[in-house]
Image (spheres, grey):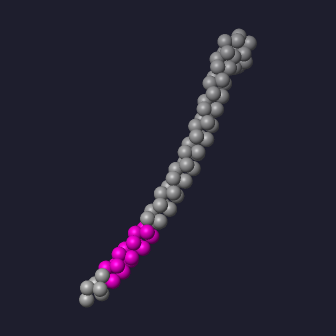
Amino acid sequence: MAAEEVLQTVDHYKIEIERLTKELTETTHEKIQAAEYGLVVLEEKLTLKQQYDELEAEYDSLKQELEQLKETPFANEALCGQ
């Protein structure tokens, strides 16, 4: 009986090892997918930040140009419709 119990225990451990190996593989795959998704989100964030910075620079430039035009007498008359 002792030999039979040992074989059952060994079989039990083999099954448990297979289950844990499969679970580890799945978990590792999920972590890799999450990391890849995180990289995509980070790249999109960087792209949006760059676009935002460019638009902000353009806005500041146009705002400064408008202020300069307002200071010019001829342009001021044209803007005010006089």
Q: Residue at x 55, y 49 (%)?
A: 39
Taking depth in this image into account, of 70 and 52 the one nearest to the observer is 52
Q: Is residue 11 left or right of residue 45?
A: left
Q: Is residue 30 left or right of residue 4?
A: right
Q: Residue at x 62, y 37 (%)?
A: 51
17 is higher (above) or lower (below) than 34:
below
Q: Position of residue 26 (x, y in %)?
A: 47, 66
Residue 34 visible here: yes
Q: Is residue 8 left or right of residue 59?
A: left
Q: Position of residue 16 (x, y in %)?
A: 37, 74
Q: Quadrant of the N terminus?
A: bottom left
- Any magenta on residue 19? yes
Q: Quadrant of the C terminus?
A: top right
| Magenta-highlighted residues | 7-23
- Any magenta on residue 75? no
Taking depth in this image into account, of 12 and 70 the one nearest to the observer is 12
Q: Residue furthest top?
A: 73
Q: Residue furthest left?
A: 1
Q: Residue at x 43, y 65 (%)?
A: 24
Q: Position of residue 22 (x, y in %)?
A: 45, 70
Q: Residue at x 71, y 10 (%)?
A: 73
Q: Position of residue 27 (x, y in %)?
A: 45, 62
Residue 77 visible here: no
Secondary structure mostly seen in magenta is helix
Quadrant of the image occupied by residue 81: top right
